[in-house]
Amino acid sequence: MSWSRTKVVSAVTAVLLATTTLAACGSDGDKQAESSAGTASSGFPVTLKNTFGDTTITKKPERIVTLGWNAQDVVYALGETPVGMPKVTYGPTADGVTAWDADKFDKSKTTLLDTGDKYPFEKIAALKPDVILAPYEGFDEATYKTLSGIAPTVAYPGAPWQTTWQDQTLLVGEALGKKADAEKLITGIQDKIKQVAAEHPEFKDKTITVGSFGAENYVYMPGDPRVQILNEMGFKNAPGVEALEKTNTKKEFSLTISKEKVADVDADVLVAYVDGIGTQKFLADPVYSSLKAVKSGGVYAMQDQQVISGMSAVSVLSVPWVLDKVLPGLSKAASASKN
């Protein structure tokens, strides 16, 4: 269903409801029907702001398409099922989804979309979505307008790929008329993170850098959710990362640095994604091995793509899945950095 068709259907529905109410104000049965209809559309219309403007959703969406990372996680956590979502190409399961969505994905109900090179607009339109959820994305305004021609599109509210996991959850919840449920999900994850911080005092105030190392070197900025959640656990950003952020005029979620400059972002704890070169080559490299974090044992090198993905695509479903997998390594690195 296109956005314009949604508006027409909503308008017709409103007229029919109004007519029914006026004609049957003395009927108990009709009052009950009216009450039921009101409950079904509770919280709508809703208008959500994004980096390109405002998006208005007139009634509760039934056919949901998600784009980018994480939106489908929130949809599933809220008890809904998307009709379309991106196919996972980095650390996927055999079905082409993330490990933490595996038990919820049903290929008979959800179409996987290949969004690698460009958006398959025709396939998205063919799914007749009532809403397109993309609160953690990086597309341009032209793409937003094209998607909005298909259905109301909930885009990211600020810089590309830097919407906090909390805001992602809340935006999806509001779009689906489940704001209160979304807030409960946020509280649950926040309580879990607080518990992690309390159980791991070795994290408190340790400086941290999160980066991807190999043929190219990327450092993730403070606005990136994978950095934010580590800050919530007690870590603080390395001075070199904060200095790099001051040069980040385009507000990108990561910045490329030369190998010779890697020492500038050294920290007590280095979370290093090394799936491109492997842990052994990373640790044996003369430049990387000279870092303070590596020398002290404060490096947590990761090469499992599913775990890296779980730590990168921060959501209300990925966090519980990935924590047990990364906490031993993080704790070991943080404890070693005391030496």
Image: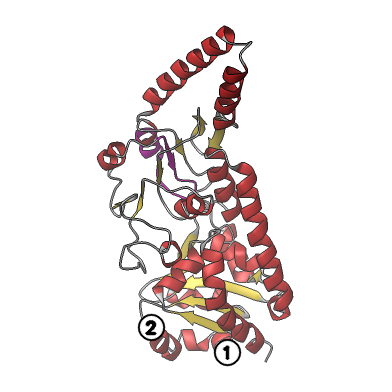
Seen from the viewer's position, the closer of residues 291 and 196 is 196
State the CA–CA distance, disc 1 to disc 2.
Answer: 17 Å
Q: What element carries label 1?
A: loop
Q: Name the residue under label 1.
A: 297
Identify the amino acid type marked 2: Gly
Q: Does residue 257 show up?
A: no
Left/right placement of residue 161 relative to residue 203 reads left
Seen from the viewer's position, the closer of residues 226 and 265 is 226
Is 123 above or below relative to 250? above
The quadrant in which residue 231 appears is bottom right
Q: Does residue 333 show up?
A: yes
- Name the residue at 51% across, 39% down: 51
Seen from the viewer's position, the closer of residues 201 and 112 is 112
The quadrant in which residue 319 appears is bottom right
- Name the residue at 61% across, 78% down: 267
Q: Name the residue under label 2.
A: 278
Q: Give the range drawn in magenta.
A: 130-146
The quadrant in which residue 298 appears is bottom right
Residue 145: x %, y % from top left: 38, 33
Residue sitting at the far left = 122
Is 337 above or below relative to 94? below
Identify the amino acid type marked 1: Gly
- Name the residue at 56% across, 76% down: 324
Q: Does the magenta stretch include residue 210?
A: no
Left/right placement of residue 100 relative to residue 83 reads right
Residue 194: x %, y % from top left: 71, 67
